[in-house]
Image: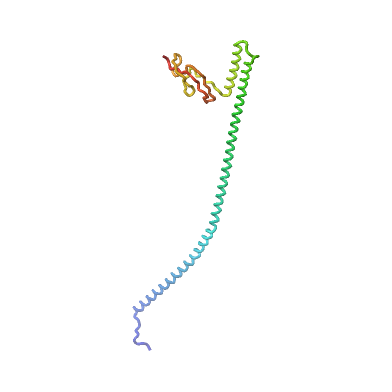
Amino acid sequence: MADENLQEPTAEERAKFEQDLENIMKQAAEAEKAQAAGDNSSAQDSPADASAEQSAEATAEPAPESTESAEDILKAELAAANDRNLRLMAEFDNFRRRSAKEQLEIIETANGKLLEKLSEVLDNFERAFAAENKAKDLETFEKGMQMIHDQFAKVLADAGLEQLDPTGEEFDPNCHEALMQQPSEDIPENHVVTVFMKGYKLKNKILKPAKVIVSSGKL
């Protein structure tokens, strides 16, 4: 027998109840969906993180070995470079010594040839003054001395020596040494009047400047 105190819900109350029930069900479904998505995300991230850690560990493990190997290579290259440098220095020092020795030998050889020719001039002087070769007259003796002089001058010229006789030339302080000045009617001012002592140069180098008297011009 039905309870007379119970009343059937109105249509408005029934619609509200159904709406509330539908909202609760939607919220529950969204909660389940969010929880499922979070689980999937955790499941996907975990292998990636583990893989990244394993990769980092795998990469990090051989690093000390690689660094040590690079240091060994650098040390070996440095030692090889030092060895090459020492060898080059030794070779250069030997080359310098050989060059100095060869240059000295060249100078000694050149001096030897020059002295050999000068010794011939000395022999001629000695023969000229020998008792059996003494000239009976001054003219013959003078001619002999002139021949020896010419021979001596040729030896020096062949060796590269050049005599400086700047008579009448313009005075050049690089080649001439002025002893004094004097007036001259024929020689222009600042030109050489007289050569007191001839100068000499070897190739392009002045060995001895000519000592000269320089014109101060006309009175």
- 162 relative to 185, above or below: below
Residue 21 place in picture, x, y as percent: 39, 76
Q: What residue occupies the far front of the structure in this picture?
A: 131
Name the one closer to the observer, 73 or 57: 73
- Give the quarter of the figure containing the N terminus: bottom left
- Residue positioned 60% across, 28% down in the render: 108
Q: Nearer the viewer, residue 93 or 15?
A: 93
Residue 90, quarter of the rendered image: top right
> What residue sits 42% from the left and 71% below the top?
31
Query: Of 154 and 22, which appears nearest the observer?
Result: 154
Q: How is the image coloured?
A: rainbow
Position above or below: 38 against 216: below
Taking the spot 37% from the left edge, 75% from the top edge, the residue there is 20
Q: Which percent across, then down, holds residue 77?
A: 56, 48
- Quadrant of the rendered image containing residue 6: bottom left
Q: Position of residue 74 (x, y in %)?
A: 55, 49
**Measuring 50% from the left and 18% from the top, which residue is drawn there?**
196
Please tell me whether residue 32 is drawn above or below residue 197 in the rendered image.
Answer: below
Give percent across and percent down for residue 99.
Answer: 59, 34
Point out the image quarter for the C terminus. Answer: top left
Q: Residue furthest bottom?
A: 1
Across the whole image, how many numbered discs are drawn on residues? 0
Residue positioned most to the right: 132
Q: Seen in the image, is 16 located left or right of residue 176? A: left
